[in-house]
Amino acid sequence: INFTYIPGDGIGPEVGDAAMTVLEAMTAKFGHSLEAEFHLVGGAAIDAKGEPLPAETFDSCKRTGAILLGAVGGPKWDHLKGADRPELGSLLPLRKNLNLYANIRPCKPFPALIDKAPLKRERLEGTDFVVMRELTGGIYFGDKGRDESGAFDVCRYSESEVRRIAVKAFDLAMTRKKKVTSVDKSNVLETSRLWREVVIEVAKDYPEVEVEHLLVDAMTMHMLTYAQDYDVILTENMFGDILTDEASVLCGSMGVIPSASVSDGKTGMYEPIHGSAPDIAGQGKANPLAMILSAAWMLRLSFGLDKEAAAIECAVEAALEARQTTGDLGGKLNTSDVGDWIARNV
Amino acid sequence: INFTYIPGDGIGPEVGDAAMTVLEAMTAKFGHSLEAEFHLVGGAAIDAKGEPLPAETFDSCKRTGAILLGAVGGPKWDHLKGADRPELGSLLPLRKNLNLYANIRPCKPFPALIDKAPLKRERLEGTDFVVMRELTGGIYFGDKGRDESGAFDVCRYSESEVRRIAVKAFDLAMTRKKKVTSVDKSNVLETSRLWREVVIEVAKDYPEVEVEHLLVDAMTMHMLTYAQDYDVILTENMFGDILTDEASVLCGSMGVIPSASVSDGKTGMYEPIHGSAPDIAGQGKANPLAMILSAAWMLRLSFGLDKEAAAIECAVEAALEARQTTGDLGGKLNTSDVGDWIARNV
Ligand SMILES: CC(C)[C@H](C(=O)O)[C@@H](O)C(=O)O
Ligand SMILES: CC(C)[C@H](C(=O)O)[C@@H](O)C(=O)O
């Protein structure tokens, strides 16, 4: 298991340490060997090397094809602009240059956390969907700038960009509940009309999968009212940014949600969805569960280690049930204690 | 009170009739005279005149400057494309040509409906914000099309477009809780950076108003977790489309939410946020409350009739408390009975 380990900024190093403890316990138990290549991105890289994504970091990512990332950014670098900023200067180029065109985030609330969500329990029980977000196209990566008349951003999608993410979504649905909900704004946007056309075409190759098309405005409502009805929600970059964050609320805490940004084959970057939380960094208060779950996803998706991933996920669930957690989830442990507890229970 | 009355498609005519009954009761009670110019848009206009926005409809809207609209669209016209479609061919040109650049939607759950929302009661009680959405700019109205490389949509904003809606938002906040939350995606989009710059500038003229800037992804979460904290949420067209629909879930029913699309001065178009609901059209089941509340907003914003608007709003609230409602809200009345009940209680 050779991967690139990028703890990053803020609480990244703390939650990263906890995840490494768990990974080491896993390798000991299952007899694997572990080689983590430690690298810098974001603010930490700006401070040490003068740039948010140093060449050696990128080279390692490219070589290993498996990246475990903590968190990026913080107020210290808030004065920087555009591509000099930690997030923009590292996350977006990593996504683009490693061709990580599919971002996957689960929404399956843990029973132990369901009452922490602002939604009623009966609206959440049984919810189990993933959002598959296109991650390297759309308005994030189109031309942007200023001219006499103001500011502009161009949203673009090619047929092939839509097709490959749609195929991934349908493939994933085949391993799950066999339903794809494609989200667009095809009553207004041309890119959305292309999106819908291509999804309809791709769907023909998956006769067993139920397909439904929803407008993004309707999806924001249905996600809250009919969460249990969804399986794979497929959408473009910006809508995905919005909908994945909305979905995180259903889980009761951002602190337990991993995400995978994957390419073709086994290349992938795995990171918690929470940020660098600079206000609590260095205090041992940070909840490492999302980072530990991200490590499990890396084992599954980049290394095909399903059993090992499941062992970690079970231990996380056990920690939640036993309240062996940090304060944000009602427990009394510090960050590394949580890592140790889970490592012992893998 | 001279206005343009456009019942539209689906349940539009039924809920429109109920609203007219209420308006007539109001005029009788307060000694006003009422002149409604009846016109067609959308599917009804396509069927009768061959186009979704006939010239005489537009002329009337322009002349009266006050439009009460029911609903537009339905499956009968689903085969039409682009600007031939009922919604696109009527709503977008009306917004643009009447310069209705500010869309305002309230989010203040009625006590009688709070338990119908998927969110827990304690998360909703006391919520009282409005979303101010820019309605005539951004990606809806930019260049769009196809070329060799795929499809594209251009999002554009000029400084003056941002400024006038920001001024409206701050003016509104001054009459309310004196807080503006401006929503953008300024960490990625150039239009959002312009948006934020201009809002910061406009804010200087309103030293009493607290300003906060949130990224759209964060806003989708905070709206569910901290709904009570907001007053005026200010945002661009597409984000507003998404956020207003998300906010509607907090109210427990789409059937009680009016919206106002206004220009400078007293020009405005008032409509329920629900659609034409073709599945229940013509059965007397449609809930007319959002349409009746839209009529009240017209009285207040286009005619300055605050007392009259408040009288209607009180009667609606009374109907909710007394369960004098349609089945969707737990009552037993049909559409026109609800209108009659409210007319009697104005
Ligand atoms: C940091 C930012 C550019 C990023 C995005 O919008 O993609 C973040 O919100 C995310 O969802 O990973
Ligand atoms: C019908 C559609 C074009 C419209 C929009 O997106 O503006 C609708 O969703 C709305 O919010 O009024």
Image (cartoon, coloured by chain):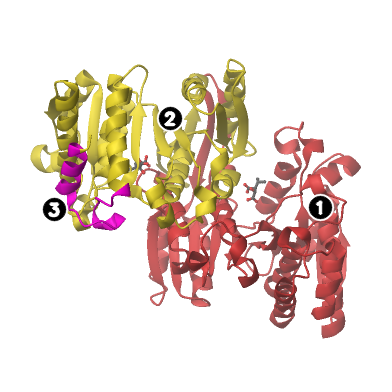
Chain colours: A yellow, B red
The location of residue A30, given as percent across then percent down, is: 19, 23
Q: Nearest to the eye among marks 3 and 2: give it.
A: 3
CB-based contact (under 8 Å), mark 3 and mark 2: no
Q: Nearest to the eye among marks 2 and 1: give it.
A: 1
Q: Secondary structure at mark 2?
A: loop
The residue under the point 15% across, 36% down is A21
Q: Residues within 10 Å of mark 3 (few under 14, many from 20)?
A: some
Label 3 to label 2: alpha-carbon separation: 36 Å
| Residue A69 vs residue A329, the one in the foreground | A329
Q: What chain letter is assigned to the residue under label 3?
A: A
Q: Residues within 10 Å of mark 2 (few under 14, many from 20)?
A: some
Residue B118 in which image quadrant: bottom right
Q: Secondary structure at mark 1?
A: loop
Give the side of residue B296 with respect to residue A293, left or right. Answer: right
Q: What chain letter is assigned to the residue under label 1?
A: B
Q: Is A130 within the magenta? A: no
- Say the numbered circle drawn on residue B11: 1
Same chain for mark 2 and mark 1? The answer is no
Which residue bears the numbered disc 3? A282
Give the side of residue B23 with respect to residue A99, left or right. Answer: right
* Highlighted magenta segment, given as a residue range: A321-344
Q: Secondary structure at mark 3?
A: loop
The location of residue A204, given as percent across then percent down, is: 62, 17
The location of residue A106, given as percent across then percent down, is: 41, 37
Outermost residue toward the right in this view: B48
Q: Is residue B20 above or below residue B215?
A: below
Q: Nearest to the eye among marks 3 and 1: give it.
A: 3
| Residue B293 vs residue A277, the one in the foreground | A277
